[in-house]
Amino acid sequence: MYNISLKGLKSSCQQEQRWTSESWTNQNSCPPVVPRLDLGSLVDSDEDNFSYIPLSTADPQNSSSTLGWITPCQTTYTQHHLNELDQNIIPDNLPAPTDKYKLKYQPYKTEIKEGYKQYSQRNTENTKSNITHLQSPRNKIDKKCVQHEEANTADVTTLDRKALLQQGYADNSCDTQQRARKLYAEIVAAEKKKQIVAEQVMIDHLSRAVISDPEQNLAIEQKESDNILPDSKISPLRFRKRTLHETKIRTNSTLTENVLSHKLQFDGRIISRNGHDACRELIGFFFAHDQSLTIYEYRQFGKNRTIVLPFIKKKIYSHQCGRRKGKQYRLGDFYVGATLTFLSSDHLSLPESIKENTLLKLRITNIDQLALDSLITTSMEQKDDIISQETNDRLVFKAIQDLLKEKLHKRGVRILTGLGKYFQQLDKEGNGLLDKADFKQALKVFHLEVSEKDFESAWLIMNDNGNGKVDYGEFKRNIIGEMNEYRKSFVRKAFMKLDFNKTGSVPIINIRKCYCAKKHSQVISGHSTEEEIKSWFLETLKVACSKSDEVSYGEFEDYYEGLSIGIVDDEDFVNILRTPWGI
């Protein structure tokens, strides 16, 4: 194929100095450079005769090959390329095309030159900007920590600054394709989970509707009252175990799949500081035909074993607190962020940790919006005056939250974790309830003063039962605010990954093992090591803990609740959790 000039290759090889490892070590302190291969005599006999263009006019002995070793005696990689790019060499002596390709080559000649110019300029700018970034004493995270400084810098302690270093993960989003794959896998898993629960709900209620219907007893009594001699080989009907397929008795109230299909499905969580209860996966259903409500718990053991159990049995329920206390649940009460309340005493099958509290509070975290829109279109619900009252209540809390937000902007982690520990110390009875004086004192201790008028208005709304005591978790959510359910779902994911035994608390040693700081902006820039970032995180997290060797779910949530206050974008906050915890 090719006619290779042996004479040209021989002369080229003779120009290179022959050496051994010993002689080279004596003459030079640098490792050898791979000799350049002279391809000038390689000619393609079958194709057009293009002249050879050398890559560089520099002496090959003095130029550093990309295949050689980089040593201190050679020019550094960055400086070498800066010098080469600064020369801005443009190959004006392009090979002359033959007549065969002249018409095809000519239109692209100018385009090739312009593209090479732009490529050289971009490389020069990028290389210089990278050097400037590496030589700068402050990187991006340092700027984030010092911007928007408060007038009184004494309030921002060293601990606050270490906590704010967690924002260094905000811009370290993972690869787009990798994120898309993770998102797709999460969506598929969630849909599969919902389908499993929905099928179990259908099976349970279609089977029990016929078997447990009171009309069955009436039918049995009617049959026994007739003077029909029973068959000696068949046991009486009342002693037989009946299933849906064996039952031959039809009742007027028998449910059908079509009736149960008109339902609203939603995801929920328990509002609790108990980690085991707060991380329960609950899926609820609101049936439009009778306004009834049921909630199931989805539990997974290992990778393949799952179980779906009723958590709140199917029944018509009413609000147990707030403006709507005593009113029956209806379609308008279901939306993301809504709170459903139940009396713990009405559900004997609930865990003991939940029955310790008078009320069971569930927060709706996700909802089937398509089903909700469809049911709203066909429903004839009337609005009442309670909606306007609830709107006014939210405005009262919103005004207080906006006032305190500036004070919490840089100190959110320290204040929220400190408030959690302070409330626990005041709660001598351990029921989570405190009185008005305790809350006033707490706000004063942490310099979160609120006007007397605003405090009284908020207290009047929260103390709806009139007993003079309020759950301090609810007080903190209303006065300071809380992150949205999208953010909180990732906090729960991170904790559930750490708490693989589902005990509700995580040893500090497990957190140290699972926390990864490789993708922190300061580690990438070289200003800090992985161990330093990890130590600073653990130092700020331990301040929130009542025990020195473990972290509870409530303390873990308080930490990220405080961090969330200073982060506007949801995706930035999600990256802060995704990157170090690998969720």
Image (cartoon, rainbow, N blue to C red):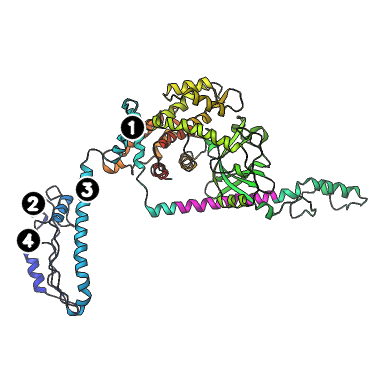
Crowd around label 4: few <14 · some 14–19 · many ≥20 (10 Å)? few
For this view, does 480 lie left or right of residue 159? right
Of the numbered discs in the image, which one, if any, rests on residue 129?
3
* Precedes in sequence: disc 2 or disc 4: 4
Under mark 1, the amino acid is Arg
Cα distance in 3D space between marks 3 and 4: 40 Å
> Could you say which is closer to the camera, residue 529 or residue 357?
357
Cα distance in 3D space between marks 4 and 1: 60 Å
> Could you say which is closer to the camera, residue 260 or residue 68?
260
Which residue range is magenta in the image?
183-205
The residue located at (62%, 46%) in the rendering is 285
Dominant secondary-structure state across the stretch colored magenta: helix
Point out the frontmost of discs 4 and 1.
1
x and y, in percent, of residue 491 in the image: 46, 40
Of the numbered discs in the image, which one, if any, rests on residue 161?
1
Of the numbered discs in the image, which one, if any, rests on residue 17?
4
Cα distance in 3D space between marks 1 and 3: 27 Å
Crowd around label 3: few <14 · some 14–19 · many ≥20 (10 Å)? few
* Precedes in sequence: disc 3 or disc 4: 4
Asked which secondary structure carries label 4, the reply is loop
- Residue 472 in magenta? no
Asked which secondary structure carries label 3, the reply is helix
